[in-house]
Image: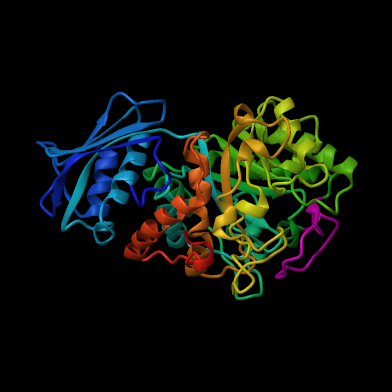
Amino acid sequence: MASVIPAPVLHLEGDGSFDLTSTSTVGGEPAVAAYLSDVLGLELGNAHPAIELVIGVAPSPGGYTLDVSATGIRIEADTPAALFAGAQTLRQLLPPDQFVGVTTATVPATHIEDYPRFAYRGAMLDVARHFFTVEQVKRYIDDIALLKLNHLHLHLTDDQGWRLAIESWPGLTGIGASTQVNGGGGGFYTQQDYADLVTYAASRFITIVPEIDMPGHTNAAISAYPELGDGAVEPYEGIEVGFSSFAIRSEHTYEFIDDVVREVAALTPGPYLHLGGDESLATTDEDFRYFIGRATAIAAKHGKTLIGWHEMGRSDALPTGTIGQYWSFTTPQEGAAEHTLSFVRQGGRVIMSPADVAYLDIKYDTQSPLGLVWAEGPTSTRSSYGWDPAAIVPGLGEAQLLGVEAPLWTETIVTMEDVESMAFPRIASVAEIGWSAADRPRDWSEFAERLNGFGARLDAAGIRHTPVPPSDAP
């Protein structure tokens, strides 16, 4: 178990082992069997498969058991998604050189019982400040699937670019998609591109969560349609925040929101739609509350559970069940705790993304060539492992939490190599916090040892990652 991340709930070592070879077969639940067959280079076959995937009994909802004996490997779970989680554990039990293709691998006998702490375990990719292609996003989907993450939050709109085609407002992907930070052009997804991403993510049991940020972070939309703001604005390629705002008292704005949300909701089979609501510094408090009340009511009628950054909790008129996403620090900044608890009072729950430990775009250390330091950074891998989501906001405990998410903003992130080197290995810390049992002792030295083994598997898969410095090693 020296490389399994997140740590399982129960692991018992057995006697003996089982040998996988290139002629071994995978059988059972079709979707997960097809995935394992593909990533391990093994044939499908239901007659006495070496790896058997069974829908049956789970140790807890969403969990799985994994048994390796002298006669074979069996993973049993109550859902295909839980089987997929067990398949990721199995991959990490293989030697590093067998992680992406089995020739011959000895797997020690073991019994694992495992299930997640939180239902929502997410990553966020900002494709607005720098645009990433469909194939690049698919790669990141594969990356985060290794860690049993099950939601990908796509930050699709911001001051620097609008990244999703909206048929009723075609100009959004003209001027609005033409820029990104520091120039170099922009880009956007057609609705077919987006549908392709949704389908691909679902094949990895990952739900896409689209974000259309408002009423701030809206310069790209206003550059395309000046009537949505206070008049014509130039496309923006900087990184400052808080200067843009929709025209709060214009009915045209709410017609726009209705159209956009209707189209995005129709393209998104998952339950969630993120409406942003953060850093609306150019909007008065009165206007902000008015806007959130109207915009969330419009969005809710399209059948999605809404998510908003914790500032949205300033409104006491949220649709029942709206989810708050906390992005303040592990010591809450002024107002952050109160605004977050507002979601709970209005029947919702909370996703925890404290910026000083969970934001993947913050520098690892002062020598890091990429990233920013505004969130009390730098943030080492060790510090990203040392927090508990149920111990940050007073009055917000386990029962009020939906889960955790690791956002990656892209002010300084241009390539997929940049994305991966900033995400890994810190995203492993957040994944373990979201999956492994709350009462499991969190020992940095023990985790760092597992990171070493996991890092060897990332190398085998060609996934860029930042080494843990010797000062943080066990």
**What is the tally of numbered marks visible in this picture?**
0
Give residue 188's position: percent from left, percent from top.
Answer: 56, 61
Which stretch did the figure color magenta? 226-246
In the figure, residue 379 lies in which quadrant? bottom right
Pick whichever, 256 or 462, lies toward us: 462
Q: Does the magenta stretch include residue 209?
A: no
Residue drawn at (81%, 53%), measured in percent from left and top?
A: 245
Q: Residue at image x 78%, y 45%?
A: 252
Side of 44 where 243 appears, left or right: right
Residue placed most toward the observer, 42 or 104? 104
As drawn, is 357 to the left or to the right of 252?
Answer: left
Q: Is the magenta stretch mostly helix, strand or loop?
A: loop
Q: Is residue 235 part of the magenta span, yes or no?
A: yes
- Where residue 205 appears, as percent x and y from the top left, is 40, 41
Eyeballing the image, is 307 above or below 20? above
Residue 445: % across, % down: 47, 53
| Residue 164 in view here | no
Q: Does residue 292 show up?
A: yes
